[in-house]
Amino acid sequence: GTYDYRETGLCFPTNFLLGAATASYQVEGGFAEGRRGPSIWDTFSKTPGKVWNGDTGDVAVDHYHRLEEDLDLMKELGLEAYRFSIAWPRIQPQGVGQPLRDGIDFYDRLVDGLLTRGIQPIATLYHWDLPQALEDAGGWPARDTAYRFADYAAMMGQALGDRVATWSTLNEPWCTAYLGYGSGAHAPGRTDPEAALQAVHHLNLAHGLGIQRLRETASNSPQYSVTLNFHQVRSVDEYSHAAVVAIDALANQAFTRPMLRGEYPRDLIDTTASVTDWSFVIDDDMEQIHQPLDLLGVNYYSTTTVRTWDREGTKERHDGHKDVGGSAWPGADEVEFVQQDGPYTAMGWNIAPDGLEDLLVSLHQKFPDQPLMITENGAAFDDVVEAGLIHDVERADYIRRHLVAAHRAISRGVDLRGYLVWSLFDNFEWGYGYSKRFGIVRVDYETLERLPKDSASWFAELIRTRRIPGVASIPR
Ligand code: PNW
């Protein structure tokens, strides 16, 4: 195979945080427990044709009912941090009003269970499960959703602010805005380019207001963050500079510039000029959005390669996103996404650890004082169970090579604080249902049994020794 089995000899300092991540709708199940309200992902997954095989998160990996067992597993693997998300509709079933006791209790138990085991809780307030009632009232294209989010943030700050180590407002607002309201591949499945850009702005506003409300309520001194999925954009030829600028503006700068600098960049306004005049940006929005962050969360899986379309022939569409008709790139009509060189994961995403190093270095150059953390990185592969074991060398090798890239970025001066693998478990992979497995722990969807894969043992060895092991050194 193409794996690199060597021992690297590279070490991470003890304060470099190593852990794993999940998200509420992808793992919890228990969809009707404790008067939880429906989210847009319940509605979407139950709409025929939207999710592979008609899969839903009704049961998922049943984490809601297997909390203690799962916490013990995290402890056995030696995780130093666990990144989870809070299901808003468990707290406010209609997105407004008093918090539900059962909802708060569940996250109370989760946070306490982590702390008892010496694992840092990293809590994300929004990983895509918007209360359906708020979507019915307009969803993220409506300004009011940002205010509802701010109230919910304050509520969670009150409830858990004495124990959560790190707060993150949003996970990947890029996906929410452009896949939810532009391409239609994600809930709520709308395909309206202007709505997608309104969603961008109201997500940014929600983030800024949310940070402020969390700060008011916290009684210890947690870290405040947001998690973005950056597109590391490359061009195929020297004529395609404009395509890189447009995609970088839509994917990356649409979030980093308002959040970290309090402005929307010219390139974004220009790229989207045929779609919107951004008149929904009003009053002191930009000041509200611009809040200092202790950490910027970076999710990284792959690179993106573009070319300026010459308007001849059919446009290539290999942007790594499920094509369901609408565009995930409002205004970028002259951009072609080209097929990239392999190897690929089961998602069809090309494996490019050097893209992670480039991304971290460029973020450090643009925002020199901003500490970073890799909040997701990992891979789906078609795992095979052999005599009760899963020798997922490809996944261990993927993680290993990205850790080497992270290590190189650190040695080039990047202030990188940690690495969280996506994901702790195989889980509900959005539009792909249960067909794609990202876990370092396998879940048998018949019995719901958990089975750590070789990549989990490999990761546990990394945490124990703080040294990036060779893939061959997986204890068997
Ligand atoms: C991220 N895309 O999602 C999410 O934060 C996770 O919930 C998810 O399971 C993981 O990455 C793996 O996909 C993405 O189409 C979903 O570019 C789709 C895209 C990117 C990230």
Image: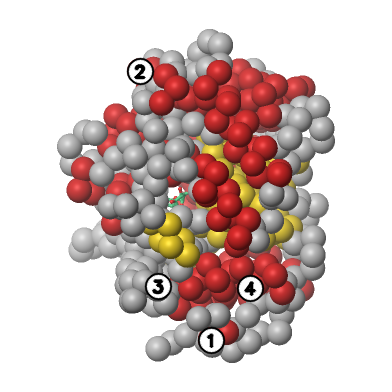
Instruction: Between residue 331 and residue 426, name the one nearer to us.
Output: 426
Q: Which residue is located at x 39 percent, y 51 percent?
A: 427
Instruction: Between residue 308 and residue 175, name the one nearer to us.
Output: 175
Marks 3 and 4, how far apart at CA: 17 Å
How far across and down, in percent of the image, does residue 459 sit? 59, 69
- Asked which quadrant contains residue 15, the reply is bottom right
- Asked which quadrant contains residue 113, the reply is top right
How far across and down, in percent of the image, does residue 473 sit? 57, 84
Above or below, comparing residue 258 to residue 388 in the picture: above
- Asked which quadrant contains residue 374, the reply is bottom right
| Labels 2, 4: front one | 4
Residue identifier under label 4: 461
Left or right, 185 with reference to 123: left
Q: Which residue is located at x 29 percent, y 34 percent?
A: 44
Residue identifier under label 3: 390
| Label 2 residue SS | helix
Above or below, comparing residue 269 to residue 400 in the picture: above
Q: Choose the circle earlier in sequence order: 2 or 4.
A: 2
| Label 4 residue SS | helix
Q: Choose the circle earlier in sequence order: 3 or 1.
A: 3
Residue identifier under label 1: 472
Q: Does the residue labelled 3 lie within 8 Å of ligand 1?
A: no
Q: How crowded is mark 4: few (under 14 residues within 10 Å), some or many (20 or more)?
A: some
Q: Can residue 448 be seen in this view?
A: yes
Left or right, 139 with reference to 20: left
Marks 1 and 2, how far apart at CA: 52 Å
Marks 4 and 1, how far apart at CA: 12 Å
Amino acid type at image mark 2: Asp
Amino acid type at image mark 1: Ala
Disc marking residue 136: 2
